[in-house]
Image (spheres, rainbow, N blue to C red):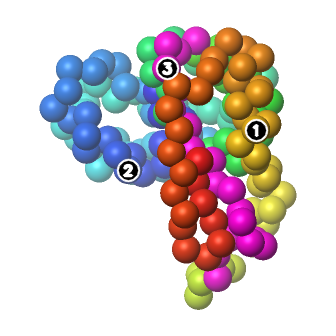
Amino acid sequence: MVLGIAGGNGLEHVIQSNLSPIYGVDINSDYLEHCKRRYPQLDGKLECICADLTQSAVTLPHADMLIANLPIEYIGSECFCRTVAKVQPKHVSCIIQVNVDDGFVSESPYLHVFDGLERVHHQMQEYELTESMKAIGYCVCDKKEEMLPNGKKTC
């Protein structure tokens, strides 16, 4: 299961696999439609689920692995852990963006596209996420930190 699948970046790595089903979850139905069109070879394997994970009534199917690369900042660690508890995966892979300098959004000519993003952004700290995951029975098995441009890093 991929939370915040958007346009499906990364799905090219599972095309030849025998993984089935592959759940793609996003709040934006247009993104999900684009994802299906982008990967027609996953027809019958990719199941897109339009869901607002901030709503506690959302139901999701079980998945052995859950991937959350950057949506945690939009739903917060409490909501993320509630989602993980519902899905009950054996493995969770997640990435959070840590802002070393000021600003969640990097300087860009397209900066105005992100106006209003601060309303839904939750500044994440690695320790907070790690402790929240421990509370629901998960532990860190591996960790990698990458420095990014513009005063950011991923964990």
- Residue named by callout 2: 9
Residue 125 visible in the displayed image: yes
- Residue named by callout 1: 127
Question: Dot 1, how many residues are within 10 Å of its Cα: few (below 14), some (14-19), or many (20+)?
Answer: few
Q: What SS does tag 2 mark?
A: loop
Q: Is residue 102 magenta?
A: yes
Where residue 60 appears, as percent x and y from the top left, is: 58, 18
Where residue 77 appears, as percent x and y from the top left, is: 76, 35
* As drawn, 58 above or below 2: above
Q: Which of 127 and 53 is in front in this view?
A: 127
Q: Give the range drawn in magenta.
A: 88-107
Q: Earlier along the polypeptide chain: callout 2 or callout 1?
A: 2
Question: What residue sits 73% from the left and 35% below the top?
Answer: 129
- Residue named by callout 3: 91
Question: What residue sits 58% from the left and 54% below the top?
Answer: 154
Decide if residue 126 is on the left or right side of residue 87: right
